[in-house]
Image (cartoon, rainbow, N blue to C red):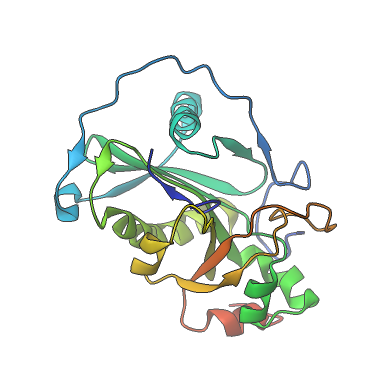
Amino acid sequence: MSAGNCWSGSKATGSCNFPSRVNGAGEVREGRMDLGHKGDPTPVAGAARECEPLELALVEGPAESRRWREQMERYHYLGCRVPFGAHLRYWVRNRDRELACLLWTSPAWKMQARDVWIGWTDEPRRHNLQLIVNNGRFLMLPWVQVKGLASKILALSARQTPRDWEIRYGCRPLLLETLVDPTRFRGTCYRAANWIYIGQTAGRGRMDREHQAHGQAVKDIYVYPLVPDARQRLRGSLTR
C-alpha cells in the first residue's frame, strides 16, 4: 500500500515541537544502499495469535536506524525515504522476532477528499493539520506470512503511536491517515483494522502546495479517528 503501504516482500501552531521541514516534499529519496546478500530469517507462519504479544519499539540510535533503513530499502517497493520534519519509526517484534517496520510522519498538506470529509476550510486546516499523523510506510517483512497479523499491528499502532507522538512532539493526534496505491493493493488490512476509506488523491505529491506535480499515481485515502469527535475538533479553532 503505497504511502501507507502494508507491503510484504505547514506551519505548526500552538505548543507542538515539530522540527522544521528542509524542502517542500517533506522527504528525500536516498540512493539505494549496497546491501549485499544476506540470508533471510526463519519463516514465520501460523495463526496471528501465535505472534503475540506484539511490541512496537521505537528505532533508536545510528545502528538501529541503519538496519531499519536497510530492511525498508531491500524489501519495500518504494525503497527508503528519509523524512524531514516530525516522524517516528518502529520495529514490530514478537519477543526477539522482527515482524514488520512502520513509519509515521507529518500529514499531507492538502487532500480534497480528506479536507471535505473533515469539513475543513483553509484557516482551520492551517491551525489543526498538526493533529493528523500519516502512516507513511508499513512493511511486513517477507518471511512473515501470517493472516490477520497486519491488522493487529495497525490496531496496536493506533493505541501506542498517539502517546509516543505526544511525548516526542508535545501534541496529541486526533486522526491517522494513509495512502494506498489501488493498482497494487486493496487496503484489506486497513479495512480490517476499522480504517475508513474516504476517497482518492488528485494525483499530485502529498506536499505539493504549488500544484506542480501533476500526473502522479492516484491513491486511495484511508483515515482512522482516534477520538469519537475527531472531525468536530479538527474543524474547531480551539482543540482540547
- The answer to whether residue 225 is visible is no
Q: Is residue 15 left or right of residue 3?
A: right
Q: Is residue 60 left or right of residue 147?
A: right
Image height of 31 relative to 175, above or below: above
Q: Give how far across and how far down residue 200 sits, in percent.
A: 61, 68
Measured as percent of width and height from the top left, residue 29 is found at 65, 34
For residue 87, above or below residue 41: below
Q: In this view, which residue lies farthest toward the front?
A: 183
Residue placed most toward the observer, 62 or 101? 101
User: Which residue appears at 33% of the width and 60% of the height?
Assistant: 151
With 172 as the anchor, is 18 left or right in this view?
right
> Vertically, is 221 above or below 183?
below
Instruction: Examine the image and state in which quarter residue 119 appears.
Output: bottom right
Residue at 46% from the left image edge and 82% from the top image edge: 228
Q: Closest to the observer: 184 or 229?
A: 184
Q: What is the x, y in percent for residue 127?
A: 73, 70
The residue that appears at 69% across and 59% down in the rendered structure is: 203
Query: Quick one: quadrant of the C terminus?
Result: bottom right
User: Does any portion of residue 118 appear in the rendered image?
Assistant: yes
Labels in figure, total: 0
Give the image location of residue 224, x and y in percent: 47, 70
Going by the image, does 216 lie left or right of 222? right
